[in-house]
Amino acid sequence: MFPTLAIVLLLQGFYASLSAAENLPPYIHQCRWSDPKVTECFIHAMMHIRPWLAQGIPEIALPAVEPFRLNELSLSLTTGPNGYRVNLRDIDLYGASNFSVTHFRLSEKGAPFELQIRIPQLRINADYTSSGVLIIIPASGKGSFHAALAGVTAVLRGATSSAPRAGRDYLRVDKLNVDLKIRDVNMGIRRAFNNNAILTEATNLFLRSNGHEVLEAMMPQLRLKIAEVFMGIANKLLAKVPVQYLVRD
């Protein structure tokens, strides 16, 4: 979801450069730089494209955001030689396409672009592996991890550059920072520890009681991985589309 939003902003310039006689794809709400309310137009364009984001847009190489996928997060939740450690793999996030744009600022005079969005709820499913001791209970095992994150606010700030190639200029995303704020957290595991009910309930009690602390432990990796996914998708696309198509005079 996060990568697709910024790409949509760049694509508006590309499609605005097409002649009026050409048919625009249905997911594009066309904007013009000459519009005194061009920022509001970009926001409307992002809201317009939401129905297509859930399924993906193959013709511009945008993957589906339902689910939005991350590969792995590794967490150390308690200290010591037998500290409780958790590894999450094959992480699927659901609900990312149900966003609203609350703020957008174009990049000007070297300042980064800034985009703020809100999502009512994100659901997370992942494969779960743990090791170490949880309180006084050995808690090594495998299972499935599930979480519901309510009241999600994301702020993306980034910088781009351009370079010539074959007589044309191409954009590249050089830097991206992602900040996340989440109001409510509810997380737990299932089918863990060979269905040992005592260990599973002890782990779920820990996760329910310390949900915000566990989420805070995830945040540094989560922000970096979201930025990494964004840059990979955005730069793959931007390598094919020259600036002359992205921006209309």
Image (cartoon, rainbow, N blue to C red):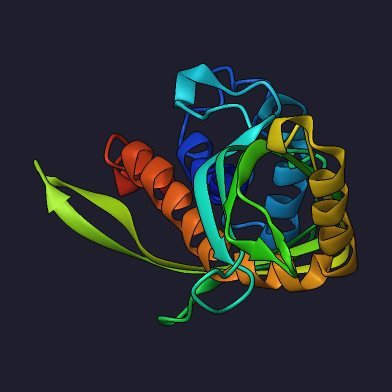
At which x and y percent is residue 181?
76, 70
Q: Quadrant of the C terminus?
A: bottom left
Q: Residue at x 71, y 45 (%)?
A: 46
Q: Is residue 225 above or below residue 47?
A: below
Residue 203: name its quadrant: bottom right
**Count of marks, rendered view:** 0
Q: Nearer the viewer, residue 53 or 188?
A: 188
* Left or right: residue 146 compared with residue 238: right
At which x and y percent is residue 219?
62, 68
* Left or right: residue 163 compared with residue 138: left
Q: Is residue 148 visible?
A: no
Residue 80: name its quadrant: bottom right
Q: Nearer the viewer, residue 225 or 117?
A: 225
Q: Nearer the viewer, residue 225 or 173?
A: 225
Residue 205: name its quadrant: bottom right
Q: Residue at x 60, y 23 (%)?
A: 56
* Left or right: residue 235 compared with residue 182: left
Q: Quadrant of the N terminus?
A: top right
Q: Residue at x 84, y 55 (%)?
A: 202
At which x and y percent is residue 123?
80, 42
Q: Is residue 119 above or below residue 15?
A: below
Q: Residue at x 61, y 64 (%)?
A: 84
Q: Is residue 170 visible?
A: yes
At which x and y percent is residue 86?
59, 55
Q: Is residue 68 above or below residue 153?
A: above
